[in-house]
Every structure is written in structure tokens, then in C-alpha cells.
Image (cartoon, helix red, strand yellow):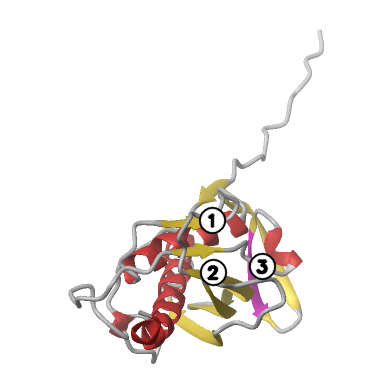
Amino acid sequence: MSSCIVPESTHVEPTFHLLSAIDFDQNDSGSEETNHFSQDEDLPGCTFYLKQIEVPSYLQENRIISRLQKGKIEFRENDRWGESIVDGVGRVMGLNLSRYLKSPFYSVYPHRKKIGTRYDINLTLYRFEKVARSEVLLQAGWEIFSRDYKNGSYPILNGKENVRTSIEPNSVNEEIIGLSKLLAILAQKVSGAIYTIEPVLD
């Protein structure tokens, strides 16, 4: 009798990763930005609504990407996001902003805006990925609208950020931690901008 030989499967189950809200030493972040304030400062809490994060279409894949060469994207089959990047960035930015703005009362898209929200925050990611063997990059734009915001009105504050941080090479976990650090830096920038006008609006 002849037997059928079944080749050994080469299928590899992907590993799923999540961004996280983390504390870190600003001096170790690889960024030249400075912290605008500390947790111990006696600042009022600012309620906010974080609108839907806007991202380019190539970031909407659940496969984690790298852009190590200009004009070339590498999609990794075995390392993927455990949630959509829009949801993940929104979740982490909401937690970060809540901490820096000292406000446990906030909401993030797709949840509805809470009554009495003081600011609407718009975030657009232009780039959010590994760009070198030991470096990750975040490029983003942000807009802040006051509580009397109406469609068509201008933001009271806006800005663009371009921040990088170093990571251990060949470690996906370190890469995810690095990307999470960049979101913390972005949240610091947005929160610091709000506190520059907060006394005027009180």
C-alpha cells in the first residue's frame, strides 16, 4: 500500500500588538521637546472630546508596517495590530490627554461627546511607523476647538509635530513601546497648548 505524505505546515500564527498609555523619562525619549508641566501642578481639569483620528489609507491595514526606504512600505505578516490603528491611537491619546489635562471626564470617538465638554480635539496622523533600524517616527497635525465650536469655524489653536524616538533594533515589542512614547509626546504638546490659553478662558 502506498501512503500519502502530508508536508509539514509552514503557517505561522501572527502576533497581535496594542499601543499603550505609558509614563517615560522625557530625556530618554529621543525628543528635544520639553515637558510643559508636571502632574503635581495645581491646574484645573479640562474636559475634552477627541474626534475620529484621521490616518492615511496605508496605515489602516492591521499589518504593522515599516518605511525604511523612501517610497517603499514593508507590510509584516506575522506582526499585526490587535485593533484598528484609528481605535488604538484614539484610545491611547484619550488616556494620555486625560492624564495631562487632569480630567477623568472625557470622551473619544465613536462615543458621543459628553455634555459640558470644554474642547474638541482633532488629530491627523501623516506618518506613524518605523523609519530606520532603531528609530520610529510620528508626524501629526492637531486642532483645538472651543466649546462654542460650530461646523465651519476656525480652531483656536493648531499645530504640527514631527517627533522621533530611538528603539532597540530587531525588537517588535520595543517598536510598539516607541510608538506609544511618541503618542505621549504628542499628548504633552496638545495639552501644553491648551494650558497656554486656559487662564484666559476661565
Give above or below for 183 relative to 105.
below
- Name the image quarter holding the C terminus: bottom left
Q: Secondary structure at mark 3?
A: loop
Which residue of the protein is positioned furthest toward the right in this rendering?
2
Mark 3 burial class by Cα count in 10 Å: few <14, some 14-19, many 20+: some
Label 1 sits on residue: 113
Q: Position of residue 123 (x, y in %)?
A: 59, 72
Magenta stretch mostly in which secondary structure?
strand
Of circles 1 and 3, the one toward us is 1
Q: Secondary structure at mark 2?
A: strand
Of the residues shown, which amino acid type is indicated by label 1? Lys
Stretch in magenta: 64-68
Of the residues shown, which amino acid type is indicated by label 2? Asp
Mark 2 burial class by Cα count in 10 Å: few <14, some 14-19, many 20+: many
> Spatial distance from mark 1 to mark 3, Cα to Cα?
18 Å
Mark 2 in CB contact with mark 1 (< 8 angstroms): yes
The answer to which of 9 and 124 lies nearer the viewer is 124
Q: Which is more N-terminal, label 3 or label 2? A: 3
Q: Secondary structure at mark 1?
A: loop
Q: Determine the image quadrant of residue 59.
A: bottom right
Left or right: 120, with 41 as reference point:
right
Could one spot residue 107 in this view of the protein?
yes
Give above or below for 173 relative to 156.
above
Mark 2 in CB contact with mark 3 (< 8 angstroms): no
Of the residues shown, which amino acid type is indicated by label 3? Glu
Label 2 sits on residue: 120
Q: Determine the image quadrant of residue 72.
A: bottom right
Q: Which is more N-terminal, label 3 or label 1? A: 3
Q: Position of residue 106 (x, y in %)?
A: 43, 58
Label 3 sits on residue: 54
